[in-house]
């Protein structure tokens, strides 16, 4: 209940109304923290067991070899407070959550690019503007995600992005998903991801893909723990950079949109080098940034430099025509969806969790409830309990009269 409802108070009310179990929100909080902490400890034990195997590690095999194993990695945010300070919110701050989805997928292979043309959604101006605004919003610390509400004008575009008919026939289909989430740093989170992937037989899959945005730690995790996986830069973030750069250099709306279409189409078709070269030509026209002087907000020269840096660093992970021919995903929309599902429980106005076990515990409960493996139900049914519990004793046998 606490993993589904938006607060402990609502969980207490729901239990009272639906199950006629009058349990206080404070008690629910304690139970949730206890169970979530147990699950986190179990996860950490499995991670240590995986990491401490003799090298080279033997990959776990499953009964049916996976067609495509796809790992999606993305960060989120939640508010926490200093624990042990009594009633109230003390030293509130934002913490980054690390989130990863593990998808068993069905995939095809093609001799030619099955969708060489840019999808309709990325050619819809209203949709792209909303998309970029949403990406920038969630990047800004302290701001709530304001993109949850849908805009009726964009429904057709979003449908086109989801794909139907011939345009979507190449896209891999998720058959089963699990996920992990933590407040840990990336060096700790990487082994957690590897242990979960091995547990699901990902390292023996026929095809393997690892998708992330431009954050460096994603690719550090990929190189260290998923070296056999094809590294793919999320195309949605390429859209963001292309649109932001075109907006920085063109004041005319029509000119800026045409520039964006030229650049984003080139990237979709694997011609990233052409885009980088044209951006450098624009840099030469605008002149260099002054040494030692921070550029003002929105300075076109700074935006162009950020775009060039992003595209240059990620060029090896932007061979989108090849990925589509191999039936691999090219966007991390599954990761974005995962973050939103987690945020529905842990992120909100005036919602804070204690640093330490309480914050980590709620992430374990929330991810467990949205996994396809029923891990929360299984854990609660089989978790270690007090030896004095009736569950630990066989029921009394009936004696004949």
Image (tube, grey):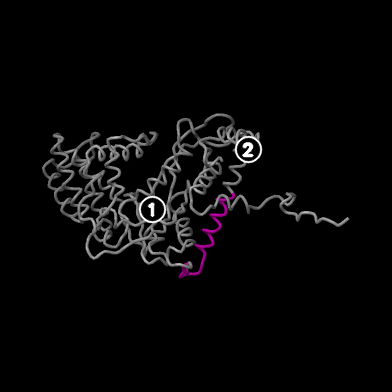
- Residue 287 pos. (x, y %): 13, 41
Residue under the image location 58 percent in, 29 percent down: 87
Side of 377 where 56 appears, left or right: left
Query: Which residue occupies the foreground of this view, 215 or 241?
Result: 241
Dot 2 lies on which element? helix
Residue under the image location 54 percent in, 52 percent down: 375
Tell me the number on the disc at residue 19: 2
Task: Using the rendered image of the protein, determine whether residue 67 is visible from the camera's viewpoint.
Answer: yes
Does residue 200 lie above or below 147 as drawn? below
Dot 1 lies on which element? strand
Instruction: Identify the residue position indicated by label 1 in the image.
Output: 72
* Secondary structure mainly formed by the magenta segment: helix
Q: Which residues are magenta?
A: 38-60
Labels 1 and 2 touching (C-beta < 8 A): no
* Quadrant where the image shows the N terminus: top right
- Residue 207 pos. (x, y %): 36, 64
- Residue 113 pos. (x, y %): 22, 60
Mark-to-mark CA distance, 1 and 2:
37 Å
**Does the magenta portion include 231?**
no
Query: Which residue occupies the foreground of this view, 80 or 264?
Result: 264
Task: Using the rendered image of the protein, determine whether residue 306 is visible from the camera's viewpoint.
Answer: no
- The quadrant in which residue 105 appears is bottom left
* Quadrant where the image shows the C terminus: bottom right
Mark 1 vs mark 2: in front: 2
* Residue that lies at the very extreme toward the front in this rendered image: 401
Figure disc tally: 2
- Residue 179 pos. (x, y %): 46, 52
Check disc 2: other Cα within 10 Å, few if <14, some if 14-19, many if 20+: few
Query: Which residue occupies the foreground of this view, 240 or 47?
Result: 240
* Residue that lies at the very extreme toward the left in this rendered image: 285
In primary-sequence order, the first of circles 1 and 2 is 2
């Amino acid at each position: 209940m606490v993993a589904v409802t938006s607060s402990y108070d609502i969980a207490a009310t729901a239990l009272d109304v639906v199950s006629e179990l009058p349990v206080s929100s404070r008690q629910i909080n304690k139970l949730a923290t206890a169970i979530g902490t147990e699950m986190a400890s179990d996860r950490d034990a499995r991670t240590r067991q995986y990491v401490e195997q003799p090298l080279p590690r033997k990959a776990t095999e499953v009964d049916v070899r996976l067609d495509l194993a796809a790992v999606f990695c993305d960060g989120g945010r939640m508010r926490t407070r200093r624990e042990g300070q009594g009633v109230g919110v003390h030293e509130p701050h934002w913490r980054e959550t690390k989130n990863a989805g593990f998808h068993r997928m069905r995939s095809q292979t093609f001799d030619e690019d099955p969708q060489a043309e840019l999808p309709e959604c990325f050619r819809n101006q209203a949709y792209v503007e909303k998309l970029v605004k949403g990406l920038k919003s969630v990047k800004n610390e302290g701001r709530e995600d304001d993109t949850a509400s849908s805009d009726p004008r964009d429904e057709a575009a979003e449908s086109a992005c989801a794909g139907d008919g011939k345009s979507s026939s190449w896209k891999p289909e998720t058959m089963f998903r699990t996920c992990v989430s933590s407040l840990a740093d990336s060096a700790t989170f990487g082994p957690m991801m590897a242990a979960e992937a091995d547990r699901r037989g990902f390292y023996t899959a026929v095809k393997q893909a690892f998708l992330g945005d431009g954050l460096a730690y994603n690719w550090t995790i990929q190189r260290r723990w998923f070296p056999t996986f094809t590294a793919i830069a999320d195309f949605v973030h390429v859209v963001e950079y292309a649109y932001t750069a075109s907006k920085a250099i063109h004041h005319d709306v029509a000119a800026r949109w045409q520039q964006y279409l030229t650049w984003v189409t080139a990237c979709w078709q694997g011609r990233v080098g052409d885009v980088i070269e044209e951006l450098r030509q624009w840099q030469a026209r605008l002149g260099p940034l002054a040494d030692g002087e921070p550029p003002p907000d929105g300075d076109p020269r700074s935006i162009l430099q950020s775009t060039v840096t992003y595209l240059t660093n990620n060029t090896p992970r932007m061979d989108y025509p090849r990925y589509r021919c191999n039936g691999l995903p090219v966007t991390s929309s599954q990761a974005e969806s995962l973050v939103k599902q987690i945020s529905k429980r842990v992120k909100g106005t005036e919602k804070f969790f204690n640093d330490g076990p309480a914050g980590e515990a709620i992430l374990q409960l929330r991810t467990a409830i949205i996994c396809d493996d029923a891990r929360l139900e299984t854990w609660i049914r089989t978790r270690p309990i007090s030896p004095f519990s009736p569950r630990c004793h066989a029921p009394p046998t009936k004696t004949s009269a």
